[in-house]
């Protein structure tokens, strides 16, 4: 259970652990193959590897072990997403599917709120096409 008030984002990992991030990311990626907006972006790609990368990034970003950095270096989110058409529609669909995943993962309300805020700002940051 989450403490009454998280001091900062770096404490989220200790509050929800590997299991919380595992449930969240797995719930998100289960939706991808059947999605008409995001599914085509992943066609022919290794979904299990993408799931692993997102899970490890979130674990690192929110105060967990730095395995992501050890394996991939600096996140470079804009550069890593440059090959994909990320317009407002893609951003909105990503947030919709991640919102579904947050509900399914049943994280504590404060953790969900913190993650939603992060996903919204990061999703907007990654828009690379009009």
Image (tube, rainbow, N blue to C red):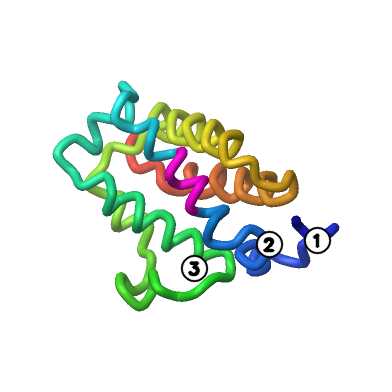
Instruction: State how far apart marks 3 and 2 are (Cα).
Output: 14 Å
Out of 113 and 14, give the one closest to the viewer: 14
Q: Is residue 31 above or below residue 54?
A: above
Mark 3 vs mark 2: in front? 2
Instruction: State how far apart marks 1 and 3 are (Cα).
Output: 20 Å
Out of 80 and 125, give the one closest to the viewer: 80
Q: Residues within 10 Å of mark 2 (few under 14, many from 20)?
A: some
Disc nearer the start of the sequence (1/2)? 1
Contact flag, marks 1 and 3 (Cβ < 8 Å): no
Residue that appears at 38% across and 69% down: 68
Residue extending furthest top?
36
| Element on which disc 1 rests | loop
| Element on which disc 2 rests | helix
Disc nearer the start of the sequence (3/2)? 2
Q: Is residue 75 above or below residue 127?
A: below
Quadrant housing residue 87: top left
Q: Residues within 10 Å of mark 1 (few under 14, many from 20)?
A: few
Instruction: Pinpoint residue 26: horizontal percent, then vertical percent.
Output: 43, 44
Residue that appears at 63% across and 58% down: 16
Q: Main secondary structure of the magenta part?
A: helix
Instruction: State how far apart marks 1 and 2 are (Cα).
Output: 7 Å
Instruction: Pinpoint residue 110: horizontal percent, then vertical percent.
Output: 74, 49
Q: Residues within 10 Å of mark 3 (few under 14, many from 20)?
A: some
| Element on which disc 3 rests | helix
- Give the quarter of the figure containing the C terminus: top left
Q: Which residues are magenta?
A: 22-27
Left or right position of 121 against 2:
left
Residue picked out by circle 2: 15
Disc nearer the start of the sequence (1/3)? 1
Report if residue 117 lies within the magenta region: no
Residue 3 is tagged as 1
Residue 60 is tagged as 3
């Amino acid at each position: 259970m989450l403490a009454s008030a998280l001091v900062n984002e770096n404490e989220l990992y200790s509050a929800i652990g590997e299991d919380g991030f595992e449930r969240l990311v797995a719930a998100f990626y289960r939706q991808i193959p059947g999605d008409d907006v995001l599914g085509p972006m992943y066609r022919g790609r290794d979904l299990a590897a993408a799931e692993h990368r997102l899970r490890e990034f979130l674990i690192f970003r929110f105060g967990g072990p730095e395995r992501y950095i050890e394996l991939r270096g600096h996140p470079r989110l804009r550069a890593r997403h440059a090959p994909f058409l990320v317009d407002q529609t893609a951003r909105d669909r990503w947030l919709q599917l991640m919102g579904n995943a947050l509900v399914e993962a049943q994280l504590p309300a404060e953790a969900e709120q913190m993650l939603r805020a992060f996903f919204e700002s990061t999703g907007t940051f990654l828009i690379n096409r009009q």
